[in-house]
Amino acid sequence: MNEPGVAATVAGTIAQLTAAGAPFELVEIGEPDAEGRRLRGYRHALPTLQALLALARAHGDKPYIVSDGRTLTFDGLFAQADALAARWQLECGLQPGMRVAIAMRNRPEWAIAFVAAWLCGAVPALLNSFGLRDELEAALADVAPRLLVCDEERMARLQGSTALTGIATIVADSDEWRRLTGPSAPPLVAVTVRPEDPALILYTSGASSRAKGVLSTHRAVCQALFNIDFIGAFSAATSPHALQRLLARGLLPTTLTAVPLFHVSGLHAQLLLALRHGRRLVFMRRWDAATALALMREHRVTQFNGAPSMVMQLLAEPGFDGVSAASLGGLGFGGAGLPQRLIDEVQRRLPGSMSGIGFGMTESNGVGAAVSGELFERRPEAAGVVSPIIELRIEDAESGALPAGARGEICLRGASLMTGYWGEPEATAQALRGGWLHTGDIGFVDADGLLHVVDRIKDVINRSGEKVAAAEVESCLLGHDGVAEAAVFGVADAGTGEAVVAQVVIKPGHEIDAAALRAHVAARLAAHKVPTAWLLQADPLPRNPAGKLLKSVLRNAWLGATR
């Protein structure tokens, strides 16, 4: 049942913020498509990322990145990035449109190389720094970069590789790096780019298949960044009390950056948002909940955004409540089928905060839906309010667009969408059908206009004709006090079509068997949703750098063990 007042609050606030003359006024942008339609966009979004860099210079000597005891100011960032870009132009012939591959863990040099590439009008190609030799070689062959900037660990993995042939390679913090970013550089040659020019290649998370390079234009990225500002304004307008409490603390806005910068969650919502608004980031080289809490305490962190698994680990860390009370203004997380236990914990332990949830994809530059603050407290089960620059519809493979309330595939169309997958026209055509991005996620839009994400299409198990959402079963399992992690997936079964398999990580000190877990699920869900096969373990489940479960790894291991 929809809650009285939510629909009016959502519609009224969006109308107020996006009206003619308002800060987030909507206009038609870009060229018409084959049917003469144009996309909605924010009038006041920056046209290019060069314009963003020009504005960011005004932040001067304010701190930008804190990492391993070092602080990089905005002035320091641009001094090194300007020198690096100028020498790249002169010594490497770097021209607009060429690719610059970046492969390293979160560190200040990552940001310097990234900004330098944009100053040259080049296209940063952000490689998965967790990738091993074969993965890195495949990505380099894919994007054919003019330059590769990496750290020593990535360089060691690629040592002697023929994939580096013809690519100028710079190792961060080496003598050559210090020369390239040092003083007495030649003048930087200004370049001109257009909103429709290529700006960025991000790789998909690759949770279930080979990662693909997602190519986006300057316009798409700039619209996505301005949409983050819209989310902030919407949250402030609908959460006046939470905002007042946050501002009363008088703290420097500071985000703990633990998610990788090569994913949209780290790049757009953290690195680039802070660059635009002069905010401080505290980098973590490697995720560890205890270290994260210590950094939050030391630097008085006001915001943390991470995968649900990271948030759950942080909440379980002794001393979290003290840090939260001292500085933390909110927690942010995203994903389908969030465990109810996580939602309940955030609601209980951070009441009146600006915590929230979002739904987006690499292919949409993170734009989709979001909700935070008081509206999140009222409707925590929803994935959020759909962005004003996104058209969203729910589709069925057979009957097409579905009415409100019906469950089907979430499809998006809008100004922030990717141009396509780099070098993969067939995959692009499959994903962008008729201009609509088919997300592979199942969801519905409720009567209040809020999006609900139910599960991934591939994570819906068909058992004897009944649909089982893996996320629902996982959430149920995580409600057990002794369960640390849970993954549910389907495998072929002669009798039922697909069997429901549960792989569960048991918390230390708890003695639980499959029978107890089966009874726990049976008491809360329909009989066809109760797993029929179980694997209990102490080791953590495999995840990618974005925190997503690698179910393909689990499924393949299960099948291999049962053959």
Image (tube, rainbow, N blue to C red):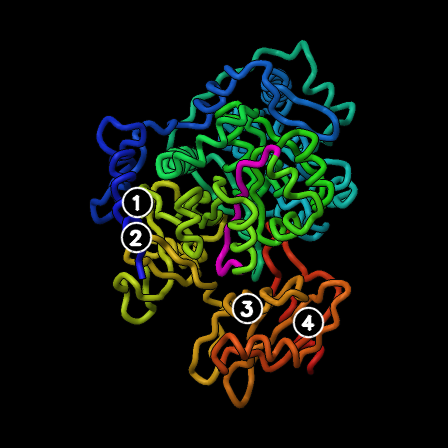
The amino acid sitting under disc 1 is: Val
Distance (Cα) linking label 4 and label 1: 45 Å
Q: Quadrant of the C terminus?
A: bottom right
Q: Earlier in the sequence, mark 2 or mark 4?
A: 2
Whole-percent x, y for residue 248 in the image: 50, 26
- Which portion, as a residue range, is magenta? 326-339
Question: Is residue 197 shown to the viewer in this render?
Answer: no
Task: Say above or below: 210 vs 116.
Answer: below
Nearer the observer, disc 2 or disc 3? 3
Residue in front for this viewpoint, 230 or 248: 248
Residue 171, image quadrant: top right
Residue at which label 4 appears: 557
Classed neighbour count for the residue bearing mark 1: other residues with Cα under 10 Å, few (<14), some (14–19), many (≥20): some
- As drawn, the label of residue 476 is 3
In this view, the residue in front, 190 or 499, is 499
- According to the picture, the residue beneath numbered tag 1 turns out to be 10
| Kind of residue at disc 2 | Gly
At a point 39% along the width and 61% down the height, the residue shown is 443
Crowd around label 4: few <14 · some 14–19 · many ≥20 (10 Å): few
Give left or right: position of 344 versus 172. Answer: left
Q: Mark 2 or mark 3: which comes first in sequence?
A: 2
Q: Is residue 544 visible?
A: yes
Q: Secondary structure at mark 2?
A: loop
